[in-house]
Image (cartoon, rainbow, N blue to C red):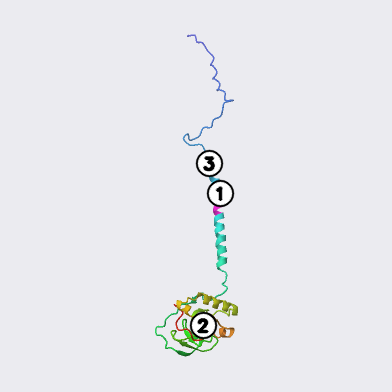
Amino acid sequence: MDNQEQRPIPPKPAAPPTAGLPHVAVPTDPTAAPPQKHGRAVSVLLKALFVVVLLGVVGGLVWLASWLGSETAAPPADPGSGVVEVSPTPLPTPLALPREGVTPPDYRLGDCFKDFDPEALRSTVVACDTPHSAQLVAVFRYPGNNSYPGRETLAAKALEACQASRLAPAANDFTLNFQRAYPSGTSWESGDRRVDCYVTADGGNVIDASVLP
């Protein structure tokens, strides 16, 4: 029998101490970059600032559009047609002259009148190269559905028509005045919508040329 020596089994070595060692977190993906929390915060702040500025700009534009709309939507003080006629339109077939007993509604821009009376119900239209005392140089027409605007408004519109008239150099050869004519309340009710501007001569039938270009 062989002699056998029994030796005690040595104890397993104790695990190395871990207390006091720094703890290092190991990322699950070694290639992944650490999170950039600061950069994200700056990006969010810039986006929020952009939205605030954009809303301010949009609000300002809306207010400006509303203000301009309120300005342009204001009703005009004088709701006429907006056009003062100062250039005569030639007829395809000129009317024979002189013409006696022409009523005011039939006066045409550029007509010349002998012995003119702006309050007369009839006048004599003559050729402008023959002696006459007045010529119709500007016309303004109100729409037929307008209500009577009042005497002062009509007088102001007639003055505007006279100021818009364009006279030829021949006008400098005569001593002329502007004469305004506009509807009364009664004539307006009967359909008169014309505001007229004439040039007239105080000395009677002394004009012998058209004063329009």
Residue 122, image x, y percentages: 51, 89
Provide the residue span drawn in magenta. Answer: 51-55
Q: Residues within 10 Å of mark 3 (few under 14, many from 20)?
A: few
Q: Residues within 10 Å of mark 1 (few under 14, many from 20)?
A: few
Q: Spatial distance from mark 1 to mark 2, Cα to Cα?
A: 71 Å
Task: In the rendered view, tell whether residue 115 sits above or below residue 159.
Answer: below
Q: Tell me the amino acid under the disc marked 3.
A: Gly
| Of pointers 2 and 3, the one earlier in the residue sequence | 3
Q: Is residue 91 left or right of residue 68?
A: left
Residue assigned mark 2? 200
| Of pointers 1 and 2, the one earlier in the residue sequence | 1
Q: Give the secondary structure at mark 3.
A: helix
Residue 83, image x, y percentages: 50, 75
Q: Are marks 1 and 2 in contact (CB under 8 Å)?
A: no
Q: Is residue 79 left or right of residue 108?
A: right
Q: Nearer the viewer, residue 191 or 22?
A: 191
Per the picture, the main secondary structure of the magenta-coloured stretch is helix
Q: Quadrant of residue 87?
A: bottom left
- Residue positioned most to the bottom: 100
Residue assigned mark 1? 49
Q: Nearer the viewer, mark 1 or mark 2?
A: 2
Residue 193, image x, y percentages: 53, 81
Q: Nearer the viewer, residue 111 or 73?
A: 111
Residue assigned mark 3? 39
Q: Are marks 2 and 3 in contact (CB under 8 Å)?
A: no
Q: Nearer the viewer, residue 130 or 162?
A: 130
